Image (cartoon, rainbow, N blue to C red):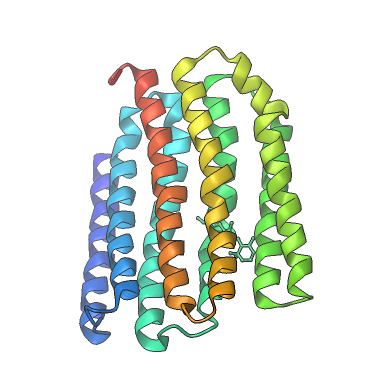
Amino acid sequence: MERLKQLVLAVIILISFSNVVNAETFLLEPDIFVGFSFWVLSMVCLAATVFFFLERESVPTNWRLPITIATVVAGISFVHYMYLRQVVVTLGGADTFILYRYIDWMVTAPLLILQFYFILSAIRKTPNIIFWKLLVASLAMVMGGYMSEADYFSGIFGFIIFMVGWIYILYELYSGETGKMTAKSGNKPFVAAYNSMRMIVTIGWVIYPLSTILIYLTDGIGNETLNIFYNAADLLNKIVFCLIIWNAAMKQSGRTK
Ligand SMILES: *C/C=C(C)/C=C/C=C(C)/C=C/C1=C(C)CCCC1(C)C
């Protein structure tokens, strides 16, 4: 296990180095804040990947799966952010840019929603149906968002699919089986973490469509500003979200109070 860990860390470090080498090839102009924010986010995601990876052994056995998922989410975002930074440098604020984000979202958004099932399973027996409900709804949601953005049908149709999926997930998390089982669990640190995570899905996720609408209305601020909003949203919705899970896991282990 120790060997395997060292190997994985070595691979992560190698990828980071290739990232730095690329930075020389695709030199970022320091006054381009959007490029800068991509660079910072890449580093935060790298740090989070290593952190969750190492912390996996420190949490109670039941909590290892959510921490593994956190590692995967941070890792995907890390690799993807390096890619996006190059897109920023080579294409600038080109229109197609936002669509590239879906490569990440398609995978990470459902994984983040499934975390509610994984953490609930860590503390009690949880019916499989909750897994499937959250999976199908979150997949439909990202597909809807993608269709809307890529203008497959009319944008509004994809947007409606997105809204239906998202509202269904919120219903499930507040008043559905998942919400009820959590409330009844009587596990205080768990309920607190669940509530914060649910708040992030309720408010943090709105940053994306809201800033899209804002940019659209103010006409001219453009895609660069939009990407900065999205980067901030990703930081909250991915990294902070997973840190809350880690914190709850630590509380269960009694290592922190
Ligand atoms: C880690 C990534 C996450 C949590 C991404 C979430 C993305 C959204 C909530 C996107 C929403 C959008 C719409 C609802 C309409 C079309 C425009 C989008 C993509 C901003």
Residue 132 visible in this rendered orientation of the protein:
no
For the C terminus, the image quarter is top left
Q: Looking at the image, which residue is at 76% across and 59% down?
A: 161
Residue 182 visible in this rendered orientation of the protein:
yes
User: Residue 91: x percent and y percent?
Assistant: 42, 87
For the residue pair 224 and 255, the one nearer the viewer reads as 224
Left or right of 95, for residue 132: right
User: Residue 108: x percent and y percent?
Assistant: 52, 54
Left or right of 255, for residue 126: right
Q: Looking at the image, which residue is at 21% across and 78% down?
A: 30
Residue 107 sits in quarter = bottom right
Q: Looking at the image, which residue is at 59% across and 61% down?
A: 209
User: Residue 238: x percent and y percent?
Assistant: 45, 50
Q: Looking at the image, which residue is at 53% across and 20% down?
A: 123
For the N terminus, the image quarter is top left
Ligand 1 quadrant in view: bottom right
- Residue occupying the far top of the picture: 186
Depicted 227 relative to depicted 233: above or below: below
User: Residue 2: x percent and y percent?
Assistant: 24, 40
